[in-house]
Each structure stands twice: as structure tokens, then as C-alpha cells.
Image (spheres, rainbow, N blue to C red):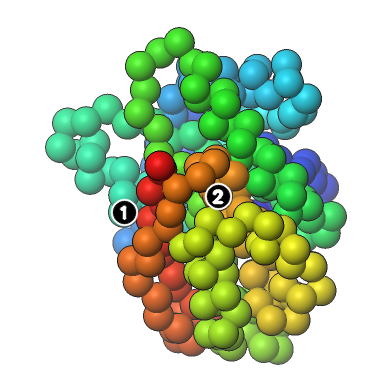
Amino acid sequence: MLFGTACLPSYLIGIGDVDGPLDVMPGLPRGTIPNSEPLASHIAEHGLASGFDWAVARAMTVDHAIAIPNQLLIQPLREMGVTVGTIPVYLAAGVDPYIRMARAVEVGGQIRRAIESFPGDERVVVIGSGGISHWVGTAEMGRVNEAFDREILGYAERLDIAEICALSDSYILANGGNGGMEVRNWACALGALEGGRGELIAYEAVPEWVTGLGFVQLHPL
């Protein structure tokens, strides 16, 4: 996702106060988002001890990539009385230099290993939130490439990490647009699962929303 032109870490985790979204949308008011600070700090510290130099944010205002799944998936649980924290993780997928796809997979694996070593009793769900095909702020904005979208969905259904890592930046940009570079978030989620299967929940090409919308649930072995 986009950090801004003045600060471009490859991957970042929010370990403190979280609010958002920065880009307020209809039906998506800005507010505080509860974090799981002990687990977030543990993931960062575990990474530093094992060769993953996390950038950390002790206070963070997230964008819609975090706020939408938080509101649609997590907030209903909180309203039912369940205590759930949202740990924001961002990968450099908005502007060059992009995180390498293989490194995104490795970051996902590191997140899993950190969670498995956490002494607390936590149930964790990893959400890979981001594009499939969409062109942001370009002459092609509104274009959706269903063939590219189906290709990415297929990799997720098969948990085909080798094939998604084989995608070149030039191929993604040509077929999925600059917004399609966000498939790195999908690769990270696949890396966190380390085996299993994917189940396609839904897909629609929605030019009116300038994107292809696809949802895959990853099931562990």
C-alpha cells in the first residue's frame, strides 16, 4: 500500500494506537481501531531476532485497506461482545520500489512463526486486503481485467506460491494496473498459511467501482 513519497519502507507493522481511515468514505467513518499491542510487538521483535527488520509505527492512521475489512469483518464481532484487535501490516505495493513478491511471501511466513511462538492464547486470522485489477489515477481508470483477476484467484485457490512469485512487475502493471501491484498482500497471506487450500467465495468485475472484487477464504491443513 502507499506510505507516501517521503517514507517508503518495504514492510511495516502498527504496534500502538490505530485509527482511521485516512480516506473517509460514505459509510466508513473515522474512529479508533483497537489493536492487539502485545502480539503486534511480539511479531516485530520476533522478526528482528530472525532477520526481518520491521519498520514499526507506534501510532498509525490507516487507510481503507485496513478500515474496510475491520468494519465489515471485525467490528460486528466486537458488537457481539468479542474482544478482537486489528494489527495493521503494510507492504510496499503502492509506488516503486515495490517489495519483491518472494519477500512478501517470506514476511507472511515470518508472521506465522511469530504467532506460533507467542506465549499468549490468541486465535489469529490473516487478511490479505488489496487489489486485483484496477488502474488508479490513470487514463485507464475504470478498466477491469477479469482474465487477470481469475488468474490471481486461481493461484489463491490452489495456494500456488511459486506461480504468484513468478509474476513480473511489468506483467502485473500491464494486465492488472498499478493497483494490481497490491497482489503482494495476497502473496503475504498465502505465505502465512504454509499449506492448505483456498475456497473462492465470490468474484465480480465492477467497473463502476474501478476494480475487480474477489474474495478467497484460505483453509489450513
Marks 2 and 1, how far apart at CA: 21 Å
Residue at x-position 37% and y-position 61%: 199
Residue 166 is marked as none
Residue at x-position 37% and y-position 22%: 122
Q: Which residue is mark 2?
A: 190
Residue 72 is marked as 1
* SS label for mark 2: helix
Q: Residues within 10 Å of mark 2 (few under 14, many from 20)?
A: many
Q: Would you place residue 128 above or below residue 169 in this image?
A: above
The image shows residue 137 at horizontal and vertical percentages of: 67, 77
Q: Which residue is situated farthest in the left direction here?
A: 80
The quadrant in which the N terminus is found is bottom right
Q: Amino acid at mark 2?
A: Leu
> Which-is-in-front pick, marks 2 and 1?
2
Residue at x-position 40% and y-position 75%: 203
The image shows residue 162 at horizontal and vertical percentages of: 68, 57
Q: Amino acid at mark 1?
A: Leu
The image shows residue 111 at horizontal and vertical percentages of: 58, 32
